[in-house]
Each structure stands twice: as structure tokens, then as C-alpha cells.
Image (cartoon, rainbow, N blue to C red):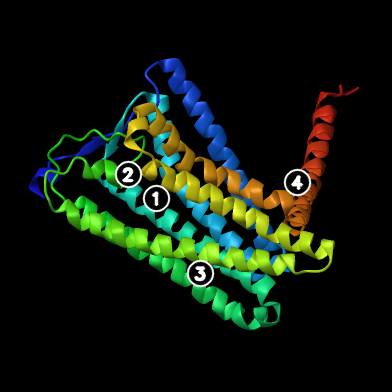
């Protein structure tokens, strides 16, 4: 601990070497983060304001949007700051907070995706028991369990990682603080404890993955038994957005760790890290809003209401100001 306490800051991986590329990366990250903030913010506002969307599916979608906002707000602002000001520094405390919140949001998202899979399974395979199995109290308990599990998991990983002695410098091979990169700086065999936590998290993640696969097998079997084509289309339309988000999350999260070392390179690792930490929070709102008619209707009503409110509030004041300006410019006879 004495060695690690002497480190006051870490050096993150630079996104580019030249000034022009740094500014380009800043603009790209700014655009992606604004898209994620706008998309997830609209979903949260639409679900919160639309009373017809107060159902378990949209309640968990609101929680997923919150986790996406937390995830992108944890990693992207610091990367944008470093690209704009041509620096690589992040404080020791800031790095610890970044690890904690990134693991917290990623774990919460995976738990929420598993719960949403259970919601789709019950609604299609056991529709008569939907109100009993997914009542308001059950939904609140499941959401609380997801956030509490994420908090406990991130707390254990953060404490275990930053209690290790670090003696291999302070340069991280990633544009944000990532646990595997910090473990590479450790000079102690006690990192096996953190690997043990990784093994436990991996087993839990694998269990959730198996549950989702089993649920979708049952869902597809039930959908194919629906006699009407319209009923099958409606059932598939409620599942496809969730399945697309799950596939995007799993492939982008696990591929960087499962790819063979022979194809590893700094540029590829950087591209993959951006792919799993930045892209999903920006794409998830788009995926969910493309095929969900109820959500699209709520978003249209929300935007129409906001535009009408702005118009009714601003137009009279603008017209009044213009009239007073013209009166002041009229010469007195």
C-alpha cells in the first residue's frame, strides 16, 4: 500500500498523437455523448411523463436508460477533456471513482437486461400470470436488487483493486481507468484476490447469459405456436429490441477479453474499448425507439408538448419586445 499511495495520478492512453486528430476525436466523442444524453434523456422523460407507459417493461427501460447515462458520463468527459487540452493525467482518486462507477453501471445494465428478459418471457409464455409475477412491488424489488448487486460488486472490485501495491509505473494502456490495466501495474501476488472476484463475477454473468438463452428459446417456441401471423409479428416486435440490445452489450463487452492474443494491438484494443464503453449507451435508445410504437408515440407527444409550451411562452414575449422596439424607434412629432 505504501507504493501505491506514492502515486498521485495515472497516465491514460492518448487517443491520438497529432493535434488535428485529438480535436477530431473530441468532436466525435462530443457528438456521441450528446446523442446518448439526448436519447436516454428523452426515454426517461417520456416514460416518466407518459402515464400509459407506467408498465414493468418501460419501468425497466427507464432504469436501463439511467445506467446508460451513468456509463457514458463516467468515461467520456475525461477523455474529451484530455483530447481538448492535450493531456493524459487523471488523479488517483478520480481513477478510483471512474472504476467504481463504470463497474457499477455495467453490472446494473447486465442485471437489468436479465430482468427485462424475464419480463418478456412472462408476458409471452405466461401472460395470465403477468400481473401476479410482475406487479409493482415485484418490479421495485427486482430493480432494487439489480442496483444493490451492482453497488456491492463495484465496491468490492474497487476496494480490491486499489488496495494493491503498484510498482510498475502509472501508465495505463486504456483511455479510461480499467481494472485489468491497473492490475498490470501491480507488483504483488495479491492480485489473485481480484482475479477471484473476476471469476465470481464471470460465473454470475455466465448464469445470467444462460438464463437469457433459455428464456429466448422458450419465447421463440411460444411465438411460433401462435396461429395468427399478426400475433407472431407483435410478439417478435416486443422482443427484437431487447434481443438487439443484449447482443450488442454481450458482444462488445466480452469480445475484447475473449479475442486471441495474436490479433491484439494497441489501436485494436482502443477501438474495441470505445465500442463497448461509448457506443452502446448511444445506440440503445435508438434501438428501442425504432420498433416500439408506444414509445415513439410518447416521444412525439413529449416533443410536441415541449414545442407548444416554448412557442406559447416565447412568442408573446418576442412579439411584445419587437413592438416596444418599434415604438421606441418611431420619431415623436
Q: Is residue 172 visible?
A: yes
Dot 1 crowding, Cα within 10 Å, few <14, some 14–19, many 20+: many
Q: Estimate the spatial distance between the alpha carbons at disc 4 and disc 1, rounded to whole Å.
A: 36 Å
Q: Where is mark 4, residue-wise?
A: 310
| Front position among marks 4 and 2 | 2
Residue at 79% x, 50% y is 304
Query: Which residue sits at x=35%, y=28%?
Result: 265
Of pointers 4 and 3, the one earlier in the residue sequence? 3
- Horizontal placement of 228 versus 113: left or right? right
Viewer-nearest residue: 315 or 268:
268
Residue 3 picture location, percent across and down: 10, 43
What mark, if any, has residue 102 been given in the picture? 1
Q: Nearer the viewer, mark 4 or mark 1?
A: 1
Q: N-terminal of the two: label 4 or label 1? A: 1
Q: Earlier in the sequence, mark 1 or mark 2?
A: 1
Residue at 8%, 47% in the rendered image: 2
Sequence-first tag of 4 and 2: 2
Q: Residue at x 26, y 40 (%)?
A: 91
The answer to whether mark 1 and mark 2 are in CB contact below 8 A is yes
Residue 144: horizontal and vertical position, in percent?
Answer: 47, 71
Distance CA(mark 1)–CA(mark 2): 9 Å
Disc 3 and disc 2 in contact, CB within 8 angstroms = no
Residue 14 in view of the camera: no
- Tell me, for residue 143, which label it has, or none: 3
Q: Is residue 85 left or right of residue 66?
A: left
User: Which quadrant of the figure contains the C terminus?
Assistant: top right
- The residue that mark 2 highlights is 178
Amino acid at each position: 500500500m505504501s507504493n501505491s499511495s506514492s502515486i498521485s495520478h495515472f497516465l491514460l492512453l492518448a487517443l491520438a498523437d497529432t493535434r488535428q486528430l485529438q480535436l477530431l476525436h473530441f468532436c466525435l466523442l462530443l457528438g456521441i455523448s450528446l446523442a446518448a444524453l439526448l436519447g436516454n434523456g428523452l426515454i426517461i422523460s417520456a416514460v416518466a411523463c407518459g402515464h400509459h407507459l407506467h408498465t414493468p417493461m418501460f419501468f425497466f427501460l427507464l432504469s436501463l436508460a439511467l445506467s446508460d447515462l451513468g456509463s457514458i458520463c463516467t468515461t467520456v468527459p475525461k477523455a474529451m477533456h484530455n483530447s481538448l487540452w492535450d493531456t493524459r493525467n487523471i488523479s488517483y482518486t478520480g481513477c478510483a471513482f471512474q472504476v467504481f462507477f463504470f463497474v457499477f453501471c455495467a453490472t446494473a445494465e447486465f442485471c437489468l437486461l436479465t430482468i427485462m428478459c424475464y419480463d418478456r418471457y412472462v408476458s409471452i409464455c405466461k401472460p395470465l400470470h403477468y400481473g401476479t409475477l410482475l406487479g409493482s412491488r415485484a418490479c421495485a424489488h427486482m430493480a432494487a436488487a439489480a442496483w444493490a448487486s451492482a453497488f456491492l460488486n463495484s465496491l468490492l472490485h474497487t476496494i480490491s483493486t486499489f488496495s494493491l501495491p503498484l510498482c510498475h509505473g502509472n501508465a495505463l494502456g486504456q483511455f479510461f481507468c480499467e481494472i485489468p490495466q491497473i492490475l498490470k501495474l501491480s507488483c504483488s501476488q495479491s492480485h489473485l484476490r481480484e482475479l477471484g472476484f473476476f471469476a465470481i463475477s464471470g460465473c454470475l454473468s455466465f448464469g445470467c447469459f444462460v438464463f437469457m438463452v433459455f428464456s429466448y428459446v422458450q419465447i421463440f417456441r411460444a411465438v411460433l405456436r401462435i396461429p395468427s401471423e399478426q400475433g407472431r409479428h407483435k410478439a417478435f416486435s416486443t422482443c427484437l429490441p431487447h434481443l438487439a440490445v443484449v447482443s450488442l452489450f454481450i458482444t462488445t463487452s466480452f469480445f475484447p477479453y475473449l479475442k486471441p492474443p495474436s490479433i491484439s494491438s494497441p489501436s485494436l484494443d482502443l477501438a474495441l474499448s470505445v465500442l463497448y464503453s461509448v457506443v452502446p449507451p448511444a445506440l440503445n435508445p435508438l434501438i428501442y425507439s425504432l420498433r416500439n410504437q408506444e414509445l415513439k408515440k410518447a416521444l412525439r407527444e413529449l416533443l410536441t408538448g415541449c414545442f407548444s409550451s416554448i412557442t406559447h411562452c416565447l412568442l408573446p414575449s418576442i412579439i411584445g419586445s419587437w413592438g416596444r422596439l418599434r415604438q421606441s424607434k418611431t420619431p415623436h412629432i
